[in-house]
Image: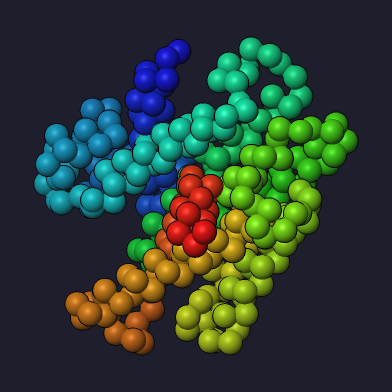
Amino acid sequence: MEFSFLLPLVFLFGTIIGSFLNVIIDRADTKESPLKGGSYCPHCQKSLKWWELIPIFSFLFLKGKCSSCKHKLSWQYPLVETITGLLFMFIVMRFLRFSFINPYLWQNINLENILIILNFLFWFYWISVLIVISVYDFKKYLILNDVLIPGIIITFTWRILLGFLIQKNSLNILPYFFRYLGDKSFLFGYHSYFSSLFLGIAFFCGLISLLAWLTQEKAMGWGDAILAFFLGSILGWPESLIALIIGFLIGGFVSVVLIAFKKKTMKSYLPFAPFLSFGALTVLFFGDIIIKMYLSLIL
């Protein structure tokens, strides 16, 4: 399949997943299973027909209103669907940017290629978890542990299993998938797979935990520390350091803007999960580009 035809399909797939993520977010408080029962209007409880469930299109066609009660629907629905579709496209583009990856690697079945494909699919899962966590924190100022804790268990187990398989089978290509800063990672020292994993978790989770403890959860919460454990498991070291710096910078900038426009005060709480997630995704997609740009400025 040509690359130009692949991206629209991935975007479409992402919007469908985004629609499901909206269901998870909406049903988190009601404790309803997102896997059981059809979708319904959150205001009049009317069951939605198939043509009301088409991602993005249905919201625009209905002009953002329920077809039955005419109550305005949240812009969360098309935004989450669109963002998920775009991020899924970025994952594919990031994957194909690896110069040493054969686009048709699935035609050559061996252990390393299978693990590469599985790890690539994990990126879709990580994106989905971060979207749910970020949107819920933005709305409720809470970390959705029902989604995050299973995400930590699954991701940490995968990373440990992957590490043992890499060592046992002397795999050479797969470790590069966790070097999101590209070949410039050596600037922070050389680290093995496991040392990078545990250093990333210890730094990310440790620093956020320290801030939560020192500020008595006024600046950071313990939920943010749990999220940091998840992100550290994905990124490792030194990628977790760059992600944290980006998250703090973006969070600080947004805080200043909101205070300047009197939307927030110095004592207001700002949900930080979206900024931590943004920092992690920025490193995931553009870490190598950021480091190259930084070096070009100082050298």
Residue drawn at x 27%, y 27% is 50
Is residue 14 visible in the rendered structure shown here?
A: no
Residue 96, position as x, y percentages in the image: 51, 29
Residue 168, position as x, y percentages in the image: 88, 36
Up-down relation of residue 237 to residue 35 (above or below) = below
Q: Indicate the quadrant containing the N terminus: top left, top right, bottom left or bottom right.
A: top left
Up-down relation of residue 126 to residue 102 (above or below) = below
Up-down relation of residue 132 to residue 258 (above or below) = above
Is residue 275 visible in the rendered structure shown here?
A: yes
Q: How many marks?
A: 0
Residue drawn at x 63%, y 45% is 183
- Display colour scheme: rainbow
Residue drawn at x 35%, y 44% is 83
Residue drawn at x 74%, y 27% is 112
Residue 91, position as x, y percentages in the image: 48, 37
125 to the left or right of 50: right
Residue 218, position as x, y percentages in the image: 47, 83
Residue 195's quadrant in the figure? bottom right
293 to the left or right of 156: left
191 or 33, nearer to the observer: 191
175 to the left or right of 164: left
Residue lying at the far right of the rendered structure: 168
Up-down relation of residue 161 to residue 274 (above or below) = above
Residue lying at the far front of the rendered structure: 299
Residue 222's quadrant in the figure? bottom right
